[in-house]
Image (tube, rainbow, N blue to C red):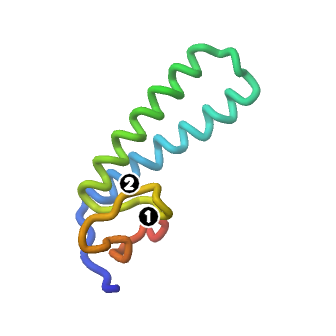
């Protein structure tokens, strides 16, 4: 395993994913106590779709975000490539 230079857009895309994840966590907490808020549910679903789209784009460009079958691997096996999402 060797560290390789990270393109600038890696960090920009990761930051966007983290922002969307934050919104999804906050909406989840809100919806736990306001389960009938239709607008919040719509917003949650919009951000959930955006998260899926961003994940696919990120993984196509930089490799897997999650392990244990949550993300596909390229060939050769690219889970070993750094930086891993938790290293940034």
Quadrant location of the N terminus in the rendered image: bottom left
- Mark 2–mark 1 contact, CB under 8 Å? yes
Tell me the distance, in whole angstroms, between the alpha carbons under discs 2 and 1.
Answer: 8 Å
Q: In this view, does 51 lie to the left or right of 4?
A: right
Say if 44 sits above or below 39 in the image.
Answer: below
Q: Where is residue 66 in the image (x, y as percent from the top left)?
A: 46, 60
Residue 71, picture quadrant: bottom left
* Residue at x 76% of width, y 26% of height: 33
Quadrant location of the C terminus in the rendered image: bottom left
Q: Where is residue 19 in the image (x, y as percent from the top left)?
A: 47, 44
- Count of marks overlaid on the render: 2
Say if 31 sits above or below 11 in the image.
Answer: above
Front-most of residues 87 and 32: 32
Q: Name the residue under label 2.
A: 14
Q: In this view, does 51 lie to the left or right of 13?
A: right
Say if 44 sits above or below 57 in the image.
Answer: above
Q: Name the residue under label 1.
A: 85
What secondary structure is marked by label 1?
helix
Q: In this view, does 33 lie to the left or right of 51?
A: right
Q: Position of residue 70 (x, y in %)?
A: 46, 55
Front-most of residues 77 and 38: 77
* Residue at x 37% of width, y 77% of height: 80
Q: Which mark is residue 16?
A: none
Tell me the crowding category of disc 2: few under 14, some 14 to 19, or many 20 or more residues within 10 angstroms, Cα based. some
Tell me the crowding category of disc 1: few under 14, some 14 to 19, or many 20 or more residues within 10 angstroms, Cα based. few
* Residue at x 69% of width, y 35% of height: 29
Say if 1 sits above or below 13 in the image.
Answer: below
What secondary structure is marked by label 2?
helix
């Amino acid at each position: 395993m060797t560290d390789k230079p990270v393109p600038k857009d890696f960090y920009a895309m990761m930051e966007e994913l983290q922002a969307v994840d934050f919104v999804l966590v906050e909406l989840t907490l809100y919806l736990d106590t306001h389960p009938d808020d239709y607008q919040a549910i719509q917003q949650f679903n919009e951000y959930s779709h955006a998260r899926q789209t961003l994940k696919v784009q990120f993984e196509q460009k930089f490799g897997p975000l999650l392990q244990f079958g949550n993300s596909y691997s390229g060939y050769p096996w690219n889970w070993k490539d750094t930086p891993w999402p938790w290293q940034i």
